[in-house]
Image (cartoon, rainbow, N blue to C red):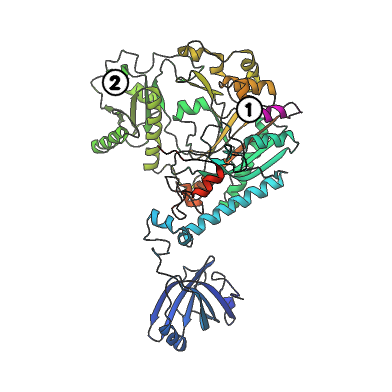
Amino acid sequence: MYRTHTCGELTISNAGQEITLAGWVQTVRKFGAITFIDLRDRYGITQLLFGEELNTELDSQPLGREFVLQATGKVAERTNKNPNMATGDIEILVSSFRVLNKSALPPFTIQDETDGGDDLRMKYRFLDLRRNPVRRNLELRYAVNRSARNYLHENSFMDIETPFLIKSTPEGARDFVVPSRMNPGQFYALPQSPQTFKQLLMVSGYDRYYQIVKCFRDEDLRADRQPEFTQIDCEMAFVEQEDILNMFEGLVKRIFKDVKDIDYTDAVERMTWETAMWTYGNDKPDIRFGMKIGNLKFPLHTFPGRQAHLQTMIGAGESGFAVFDNAETVLAIAVPGCSEYTRKQIDELTEWVKRPQIGMQGMVYIKCNTDGTYKSSVDKFFTEDKLKAIADAADAQAGDLVLILAGKEERTRKATSELRLELGKRLGLRREDEFRLLWVLDFPLFEYAEEDNRWVARHHPFTSPKPDQIATMIDNDPLIANADKYLEHPYANIKANAYDMVLNGNEIGGGSIRIYQRELQEKMFAALGMSQEEALHKFGFLLGAFEFGAPPHGGIAFGFDRLCAILGGSETIRDFIAFPKNNSGRDVMLDAPSSIDDKQFEELQIKLNLK
């Protein structure tokens, strides 16, 4: 055998035992007639001591970093113990050794703190995977996987595989397509999710399904997005929304306990989509800290169904300050304890909101001094009483700094949200060791695409309306005669029977109660501008299945990679994927994607027409 023990398990209790280890050479240290070698494997590091006789042999065949080595010897107590190593109390007095394989000089140091940049480490990812931080990330990923599977198995869910080669269907992103040699001119698509398959499984009577499954979307990439990613995909039959929320709160709490030893006993807060957008500026709010957004001037129309408000704290067109008077909306946040910010600090924040990624023209501030006075960059436009009223509207306290942005509604809301998150980070309010869960509910079922003059699904076309709004959808024609009147259409107020789970400002899961009646599903397709012929061509299999006793059902999918990254304290999911793609969607280790040879094109009956 190559080894009797691993490099991470031997302790002082093994002293005197004859053992054999195998692993990679981490370091070589020569001290006269003896040599110390740190031998590493997945489990840890053990120090080897080569005496004078073997030291001479090492001189004739020196060992280098990352050589694969087998060593046999006796476990002995170390004289200079290392309390920072699990095996720091012992060393191995080597009696014989064998080089199992030599190694070229690694292109970067394989240590916790490496000198390799991202591109270099991705090119040699098989070496990067030897480093402890990467190994710990993959161990955490495996722990999340194992915990989820155990919980779902205990709750009678069945792991059922679904195909990877499927039909291209519109689900919101571009498909990856695969040509079929046996069916020239026709193509498979890689699934963006197993959505229709899991619904068909509900029709088939498998009332609790799950997969930890690969999904594929041809999208532009960023830190939390990869062309292939993993979901914890789940579906249940004979359930209502409350059943789903309770079941999957339990799943996430179980993962917290198993992986992080956190007893999450608090009730998971629930918030409507509209409240999230008005209070935090986005639909995945980080509720670890306050700093809620105060709306100082409601626009004429913001969200479907909200009544218009014009006269507010600043007065509509009456303040004499054109920036506020002419703005569609004016939003404020109160930054706790920051009234002492210097002009330099405030100017730096002003430049921050002017960056192209944020897109604002400037920023107004009000200092709520601890002596009860107010100092602002717009003192000449507002009395101190008015400044106090604005600060109160932002829920500011003495010692706070009120920051105000004004402009077009959507841009201003997004900018205020980003400013809130940035200040939360700077002030240490977004702690990586604190976890806060939130359900966001009651999303709009539809969004209106003005350029196409039609409705689009906010989630996906299989999401059911709230039960009391199904009749509104069935009884009304989705067509809009005048695009300016879409907010007055009944569809603008229909809420989806959908839910997102948010963790620390990140959406980690989303789902819905599904449509399961053919008439309603056909109405949804028609609302999205799909003809009856197109609906039958793309989804005839699903519509047909609904005629054979489809049960009420719903489900959820968790972003597995993103959940792992949050639990591991990282901002990028690539750290928790063994072989990730870069921001251009390339695997630089394999040099993929790559061209194929002419013979393959001939077999597929495909010609390239690059322009």
Residue drawn at (46%, 40%) of the image: 608
Q: Which residues are magenta?
A: 539-550
Crowding at mark 2 (Cα within 10 Å: few <14, some 14-19, many 20+): some
Task: Verify whether residue 545 appears in magenta.
Answer: yes
Is 284 part of what is drawn in magenta? no
Q: Position of residue 385 (x, y in %)?
A: 31, 20
Mark on residue 148?
Answer: none
**Residue 131 visible in the displayed image:** no
- On residue 537, the disc is 1
Q: Secondary structure at mark 2?
A: helix
Q: Badge 1, how many Cα within 10 Å: few under 14, some, many 20+?
A: few
The residue at 43%/85% (across/down) is 55
Label 2 vs 1, first from the N-terminus: 2
Q: From the viewer's side, name the closer residue of 126 and 414.
A: 126
Q: Is residue 251 left or right of residue 83?
A: right
Q: Amino acid at mark 2?
A: Val
The part of the image, by quadrant, that contains residue 298 is top left
Q: State the residue at coordinates (47%, 51%).
A: 575
The three-letter code of the residue at mark 1 reads His
**For the N terminus, which image quadrant?**
bottom right
Q: Is residue 199 visible?
A: yes
Report x, y in % for residue 471: 65, 16
Residue that carries the numbered disc 2 in the rendered image: 323
